[in-house]
Image (spheres, grey):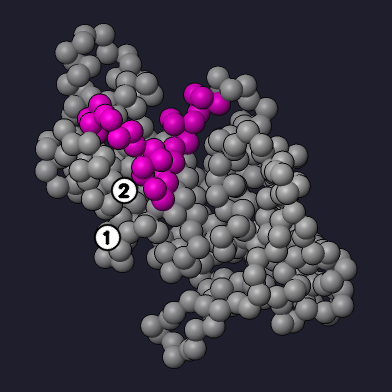
Amino acid sequence: MVLSRILEVADLKVEFRTYRGVVKALNGVSFNVDKGEVFGLAGETGSGKSVTGLAIQRLLPGNAVIVEGRIVFDGRDLLSLKEDEMNKIRGKEITAVFQDPHTYLNPVFTMREQFRDILLTNDREIASIKDKREIEKAVHDRIIQMLTEVQMPAPERVIKMYPHELSGGMKQRMMLAMAFSLRPKLIIADEPTTALDVTIQAQVLELMKSLQKKYGTSVILITHDLGVIAETCSRIGVMYAGRIVETGTVDSVYSEPLHPYTQGLMRALPRADKDLKVESIGGSVPDLVDLPTGCPFHPRCSRAMEICRKINPRTLNIDGRIVECHLYDGETSRGRVA
Ligand code: SF4
């Protein structure tokens, strides 16, 4: 394993047992995240982005089964850890920012009480203080410091508030302050700005970027919004039907998308710098209970060939870009098996 790597996900397969049958949510997801890197996971709803984020934290719902795969975080195989060992990593070394802070913030406690709880449970430095008054002072100072770092207006007043008294932008600043307060090695941010209006969205992303740089944190940014990834991430993985079909640097993927699905996502992206017509991808995402044979994108792909209907494309490495598409395979292409 490369020393600079914080996370390695290899051939991850996750299924959900439902009344409709077995939902094949992840069908062999593989990607790496380096230390201090912001990696974007993109794709339409139902492509498997959020399931990937939950699987890394081992927070999948009860009807989910990890069929196979490996998740190595900072040298430890997360899937082989006992629950109490995982508890020591989750919320400390790996933290999360969700789209809807309501799922995370408790409506009956003030922000101070909730933040205090996180620090008392997880912060080793604060846990080592013996004197009760010193503990409360350290907690208070850390909360105010973090709220100042996320540019929360009037932090001393805000900590006395309940979640419903905060605006959407303030809640997301609070989530960022909580997520970064324990200096985690990895933050999984799942659609952190989707519910916010455009101006607040830009402010929250800017804040996340500056905190990430300051603390050298690795971030997986999950979003359907390719504009957000372009502004925030260094690399991108494009998901479709529970697989990553293309991975590369943001610069290379945005300037020359290889996979027809990535090309479709790019055409659907409004671009101020280009006078291009915005086109949506025709058709709809496949039913994960009954995936098409061959390449799962073939029913929507304008470049589909006979082979695409029968055989799933291999994973190819094309000059450092990872892509799964028959167009780049075989003697006539520049592809090679990854
Ligand atoms: Fe389209 Fe075939 Fe490539 Fe799939 S493998 S994306 S169907 S060309």
Residue 320 in view in this figure: no
Query: For this rendering, which residue is in front, 99 or 2?
Result: 99
Q: Tell me, for residue 200, which label it has, or none.
A: 1
Q: Measuring 21% from the left and 10% from the top, which residue is drawn there?
A: 132
Q: Measuring 76% from the left and 47% from the top, which residue is drawn there?
A: 21
Q: Secondary structure at mark 2?
A: helix
Residue span colored magenta: 86-113
- Percent from the top left, x then y, of residue 109? 26, 29
The reply, left or right, for residue 234 in relation to residue 68 is left
Sequence-wise, the earlier of marks 2 and 1 is: 2
- Percent from the top left, x then y, of residue 337? 79, 62
The reply, left or right, for residue 256 in relation to residue 20 is left
- Percent from the top left, x then y, of residue 225? 46, 65
Residue 93 included in the magenta stretch of the image: yes
Query: For this rendering, which residue is in front, 78 or 311?
Result: 311
Q: Would you say the beta carbon of the disc 2 residue lies within 8 angstroms of ligand 1? A: no
Instruction: Identify the residue under disc 2.
Output: 172
Q: Quadrant where the C terminus lies?
A: bottom right
Disc 2 marks a residue whose amino acid type is Gln
Q: Do callouts 2 and 1 mark residues in contact (Cβ within 8 Å)?
A: yes
Q: Measuring 63% from the left and 33% from the top, which residue is drawn there?
A: 62
Disc 1 marks a residue whose amino acid type is Ile
Q: Secondary structure at mark 1?
A: helix
